[in-house]
Amino acid sequence: MKKRVALIWAPLVMGPALMLPTSTLAATGYTFTIVNQHCLSGGHNPYIEVRLTAAGSTPANKLTIKSTSQYLSGGTWHNFYKWKTNTVKFTPNGQAHSIDYSYDHVNNSDSRKWRIVSALKAYQGKHVLASKTLTSKAC
């Protein structure tokens, strides 16, 4: 009998929760930002600056950014260059912590479109607390 009651209530509770905007359901205390992005002169050369901030109220102790340049060929984006993962480690102390890096891909002789994709993650130890992928405009 208890299982039947749970099965009846689950859709009634989960239904409205699933209708909420994703930002409402997302982890709070983490801000993922494209600080600046543009196409550099001279060709198909994207530039992006991204930032991840963990509020002091979060348990995060490590922030990372891993970025890759990509080119468009045959209607599909292909990975070209992977930068080393940028990392900042800290002891949670009630203060906000951030990581901020900029990336550019310069190739003035290539006529293909290029972009930069950055994966930002907040960790507590090895556990991912929040993550988001930010993509530059295509140049």
Image (spheres, rainbow, N blue to C red):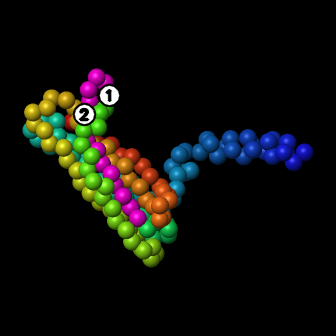
Q: Residue at x 64, y 46 (%)?
A: 17
Residue 78: where, in percent of width, then height?
A: 29, 33
Name which quarter of the figure residue 9 lies in.
top right
Residue nearer the viewer, 123 or 137:
123
Q: In the image, is residue 19 part of the stretch drawn in magenta?
A: no
Q: Tell me the magenta residue range.
A: 62-75
Q: Which residue is mark 2?
A: 71
Judge from the rendering whether residue 6 lies leftward or rightward of residue 86; answer left or right.
Answer: right
Q: Residue furthest right?
A: 1
> Magenta part mainly helix, strand or loop?
strand
| Residue at the top extreme, as displayed | 74
Label 2: which secondary element? strand
Label 2 sits on what residue type? Answer: Tyr
Q: Amino acid at mark 1?
A: Thr
Mark 2 vs 1, N-terminal side = 2
Q: Secondary structure at mark 1?
A: strand
User: Where is residue 51, by image quadrant?
Assistant: bottom left
Q: Is residue 42 visible?
A: yes
- Image x and y of residue 125, in percent: 47, 65
x then y, percent, for residue 97: 38, 68
User: Alpha-carbon neighbours of circle 1 within 10 Å: few (<14), some, or many (≥20)?
Assistant: few
Please give the name of the residue rendered at 31% of the width and 32% of the height, measured from the top-left corner. 77
The residue carrying mark 1 is: 76
Above or below, 97 against 135 in this view is: below
Q: Is residue 36 visible?
A: no
- Left or right, residue 107 beside residue 87: left
Q: CA distance from mark 2 to mark 1?
A: 8 Å
